[in-house]
Amino acid sequence: MMSAIFFYILATLILVFAYKTITANNPIHCALYLAITMINLAFLFFGLNAPFIGGVQLVVYAGAVMVLFVMVLMLFDLKSEIRAFSRGLFSGLLKIASAGLIFGILSNAIFKTGDLLGLASGGPGMPDPAGTSRDLAIMLFTKYLFAFEALGLLLLLVAVGAVAVSRIKGGTHAN
């Protein structure tokens, strides 16, 4: 079981790097901070005795999603993107409205989840997820192994294609 000190250290690191993710000016630094946030979140899952979810967090989010994010960054001319979307009254109002909308959606989801689980009414609480993650792992690596490997190959091809497209004549990073 995880000690309270370890939990609070990881939670603090997650909050710090998540904040740095949304405040950093360089998109590559944002991707790095996001990856560090996801890795800390995986360690939090490991500490809470959920090794399968922690492993999925590391492999899928800290690995594959971050690679795709960096590939998308490679395809854009970041200097013109920053000039186009960083300044102006409309852009600032749009950012504030988007943040408010996301906060409202997340708040609603948190309250609805509590109602569904019966936590607000003193109901039974959360079910034990130990069997479900094991069953998911067995199914993923037996019945759906070919699809899992095909997806890995597809992600590799997307990475190679993104690099090729960004380097051709007229591309954003052409020499």
Image (cartoon, rainbow, N blue to C red):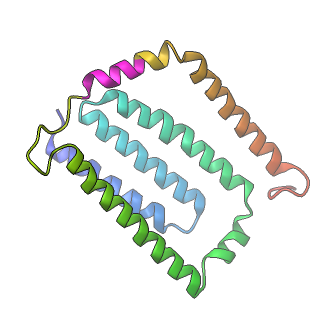
Q: Residue at x 36, y 66 (%)?
A: 104
Of all residues shown, which one is farthest toward the top? Answer: 142
Question: Could you say which quadrant of the image residue 132 lies in?
Answer: top left
User: In the shown orientation, is residue 81 left or right of residue 102?
Assistant: right
Residue beneath the point at 43% across and 32% down: 56
x, y percentage for residue 3? 15, 40
What residue lies at 30% left-to-right and 37% top-to-bottom? 45
| Residue at horizontal 57 percent and vertical 23 percent from the top | 148
Above or below 88: residue 153: above
Q: Position of residue 120 (x, y in %)?
A: 13, 51
Q: Is residue 131 magenta?
A: yes
Q: Is residue 117 above or below residue 21?
A: above
Q: Taking 123 as reference, is 149 left or right?
A: right
- Between 29 and 22, the one nearer to me in the picture: 22
Image location (x, y in percent) of residue 49: 24, 30
Is 95 in the magenta?
A: no
Q: Which residues are magenta?
A: 129-137
The prevailing secondary structure element of the residues shown in magenta is helix
